[in-house]
Amino acid sequence: MTQGQGAATKRVTLVDVAAAAGVDKAIVSRVVNRDPTLLIRPETRVRVEAAITELGYRPNLSARSLRTAKTGILGLVIPDFGNPVYAQIIAGAEAAALSSGHVLVTGSASGAASPAEYLDLLGNGRVDGLLIAGGAPSAQEQRILDGFDIPWLLVNRRDRNSHRYVILDDAKAAGMAVDHLVDLGHTEIAHIAGPKTADTAQRRLKGFTSAMAAHGLRAPASRIVTGEYTMDGGAEAAAKLLSARRRPTAIYVANVAAAVGVLHELAGRGLSVPNDVSVVTTHDTDLASHVMPALTTVRMPLRKLGATAVRELLDNPPDAAVEQILSDDLTLVLRGSTARSR
């Protein structure tokens, strides 16, 4: 692999070019910007330009905009537009962006050749800051983020290598769901968790197991099943859960879309909700209130999450640690999917 090819995975900087050419970073910058006042030997200029070509250096347009005029645009990357949870996050982020004099541009990396290429495209001087509401970045994506001269934040996702995120207190939400079921007299409580790779799923699982233990209840492995954050994922997880010899009387589902799939699977098996099985889930969307029966949920401040992320993005320099967990404004919304244990 040549150095130029390596630039696909690691952004080449002015420092890299300067080291290769044996000159100061400031000289490279002035050559790149065609500074007419720069007085250097012709052979030095040739050496710098050769290093630029060999390393595949591309000028970081965002660095220029920070020194001159900003774009007035903030970017928000989400996994897909089909998840209703992201609609509320986008609404909150958009309102905060407008109030600060910015326009929010939202896109999904699902159609790109790779998420890394999408991040690289957005970060190349096209936005003043970037919010990433999908999964934690891969090693390649992290290198791209580290090379940005613009601020960026993970939204409701954490990564052990990152100290820049704003998240909701998912563990607390899971605990509230368990407390509600226990208050209704349930002791045979199961959990349909999200994907093992999802940080939100891990936080909700931790909250579930901690709350169960606090009530003196066991959560055996047979009562915890993982599934995708989709209706099909919820239905498939429920099928696995219900194949066990002893059926739970209540289920806490980690995601509202998955909970709709759970309702479908239970109905297909002739089980009544909430008479046979109570169901409670995280997040409150229009979908939750329009299924039969309507879902009991723990409402999360998704709009506040989007707005807070924008403010933290704009108020902190790119290299500052931002580690914020929003624990307020979580609300239990009682509907028809939960009832007292029989």
Image (spheres, grey):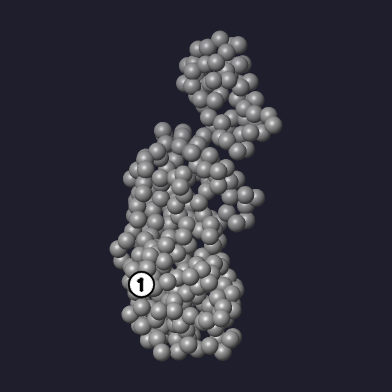
Spot the residue most to the left.
Answer: 328
At x 35% / y 83%, what residue is drawn? 184
Residue 95 shows in the view: no
Q: Quadrant of the N terminus?
A: top right
What residue is rendered at 47% in x and 74% in y? 190
Q: Residue at x 33, y 80 (%)?
A: 183
Residue 330: horizontal and vertical position, in percent? 33, 68
Q: Is residue 118 left or right of residue 319?
A: right
Determine whether 274 is above or below 80 in the image: below
Residue picked out by circle 1: 216
Residue 173 image offset from top left, x and y in percent: 37, 67
Can residue 339 be seen in this snapshot? yes
Position of residue 40 relative to residue 303, above or below, is: above
Residue 179 placement (x, y as % from top left):
34, 74
User: Between 248 and 193, which is closer to the camera in this rendering?
Assistant: 248
Q: Is residue 45 left or right of residue 63?
A: right
Q: Secondary structure at mark 1?
A: loop
Q: Amino acid at mark 1?
A: Gly
Image quadrant holding the C terminus, namely bottom left
Instruction: Tell how many labels.
Output: 1
Of the pair 149 and 174, the residue shown nearer to us: 174
Q: Is residue 140 above or below residue 342?
A: above
Query: In the rendering, at what x and y percent does residue 212 appear?
Result: 38, 70
The residue shown at (35%, 56%) is: 325
Residue 251 or residue 134, whichever sits in front: 251
Mark 1: few/some/many CA within 10 Å (<14, 14-19, 20+) = few
